[in-house]
Image (tube, grey):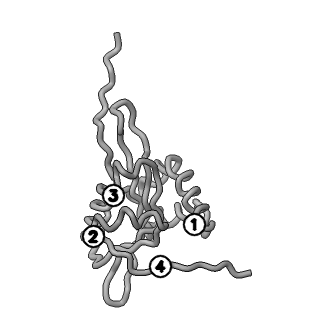
Amino acid sequence: MQAEKIIKKEIEVLPISPSQIEGVWPLCTFMIAEAIKYSGNYAEPKHIKDLLLTGENQLFLIFGSDDGIENKIFGLATTRIFHNPNYAELQGLICTGKRMDLWEEKLINTLETFAKLNGCKKIKALMRPGYKKVMPKYGYKMKHIEFEKELN
C-alpha cells in the first residue's frame, strides 16, 4: 500500500527572479496571452517575457493547493517600477487567475512589501471595472477612470 501524499492546503505568492523566468514560462504564457487579449492585444506574450527576463518587469506567481490534493497555478501578476521625477511607484500591469478570493490579500501584501523594499512611494494599477469591488477593502481608492477609443 502506497502512503497518501499530504500537501499543505495553502496558497503562496512567489516573486520570480529573471533567472527563473524560463523555467516557469510554460506555466504562465497562456494566462498572459489571455490577459493581453482581454486588454486589446497591446503586446505578444514574448514581449512580456522579454521584459521579465531583463528585470524591467517583475512576475509574481500564485501557486499552491486549495484542496490538499494537488498543487496548481492559481494566477499571476506582473509589475514594473516606474521612476517619476519625485518618487518611484510600483505599477500593476497584469493580474489574472482563478479563485481570487483565496489569494487577493496575499498578493496585495506581497506587492506592497515588494514596493516598499524597492523604495516605491505608491502602487498604481490600471484595472478592469470588477476590481472596484475588491480594492477598497485593502485601502485603495479609485482616482481615475480610463476612457478608450480606437483610432482608424
Front of the two marks 2 and 3 = 2
User: Where does residue 92 sit, x and y in percent of width and height?
Assistant: 42, 68
N-term-proximal mark, 2 vs 1: 1
Residue at disc 4, secondary structure: loop
Query: Most extreme residue toward the right, as rendered?
Result: 152
N-term-proximal mark, 4 vs 2: 2
**Badge 4 amino acid:** Ile
Closer to us: 69 or 21: 69
Residue beneath the point at 38% across and 58% down:
17
Disc 4 versus disc 3: distance between alpha carbons?
A: 23 Å
**Badge 2 amino acid:** Gly
Q: Which mark is residue 39?
A: 1
Residue at disc 2, secondary structure: loop
Disc 4 versus disc 2: distance between alpha carbons?
A: 18 Å
Disc 1 versus disc 3: distance between alpha carbons?
A: 21 Å
Asked if disc 2 and disc 3 are in contact, CB closer than 8 Å, the reply is no
**Which residue is the site of mark 4?**
145
Give the crowd class for mark 1: few <14, some 14-19, many >=20 residues within 10 Å: few
Residue beneath the point at 33% across and 32% down:
68
**Badge 1 amino acid:** Ser
**Which residue is the site of mark 3?**
107
Closer to us: 72 or 102: 102
Residue beneath the point at 37% across and 86% down:
84
**Which residue is the site of mark 2?**
139
What is the quadrant of residue 86 in the picture?
A: bottom left
Question: Horizontally, is 10 left or right of 125 in the view?
Answer: left
Asked if disc 2 and disc 1 are in contact, CB closer than 8 Å, the reply is no
Name the quarter where the C terminus is drawn: bottom right
N-term-proximal mark, 4 vs 1: 1
**Badge 3 amino acid:** Leu
